[in-house]
Amino acid sequence: MSDKLDFCEALWKTYREEAPKHGIEKPRGHEAAWGGIAVCAGTDAEAEAQFEDMAWFWEKWAKQFGQGMPLKLVGSPDTISRQIDEAHKALGFDEIFFLIPQGIHSSDQIISSLDLITTKVMPRFN
């Protein structure tokens, strides 16, 4: 869940090197999924405003357990698509995950965000 692509590449490269020693063959792109907290809205400003609730939650709850803030996939469909494309070019992953702030955002916010992700972001990727 890191936005540090160099770190992810170093970690995944080490995995590719060590896995065969344990009978595991993983080609580039199959080491791990990549992703983070996803909040998609019509504009970047709208998504950032919605993300404030999740940031508050993470700061007040998860951080106390040693969990740093995951990668933010927060913005318009174009912004999130650019983030995914940049990371994919660097890492070559074949799976992505989205942490959705269910229980924090309203059901309308969640449905709207997921609708934008599934109709405007996902179709850009195979």
Image (cartoon, helix red, strand yellow):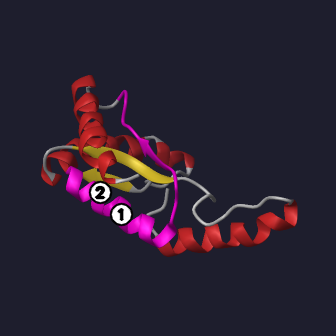
Give the left or right position of residue 114, taking residue 78 as reference: right
Figure quadrant of residue 32? bottom right
Helix, strand or loop status at disc 1:
helix
Amino acid type, label 2: Ser
- The spot of residue 23 in percent (x, y) is 86, 59
Vertical position of residue 52 compared to residue 27: above or below: above
Q: Is residue 3 visible?
A: yes
Report which residue position mark 2 lands on.
81
Mark 1: few/some/many CA within 10 Å (<14, 14-19, 20+): some
- Kindly identify the residue that appears in the image at 36 percent across and 36 percent down: 101
**Residue 30 lies in the magenta stretch:** no
- Kindly identify the residue that appears in the image at 37 percent across and 59 percent down: 84
- Kindly identify the residue that appears in the image at 14 percent across and 52 percent down: 45
The foreground one among 45 and 43 is 43
Q: CA distance from mark 2 to mark 1?
A: 6 Å
Helix, strand or loop status at disc 2:
helix
Outermost residue to the top: 107
The magenta region covers 76-103
Report which residue position mark 1 lands on.
85
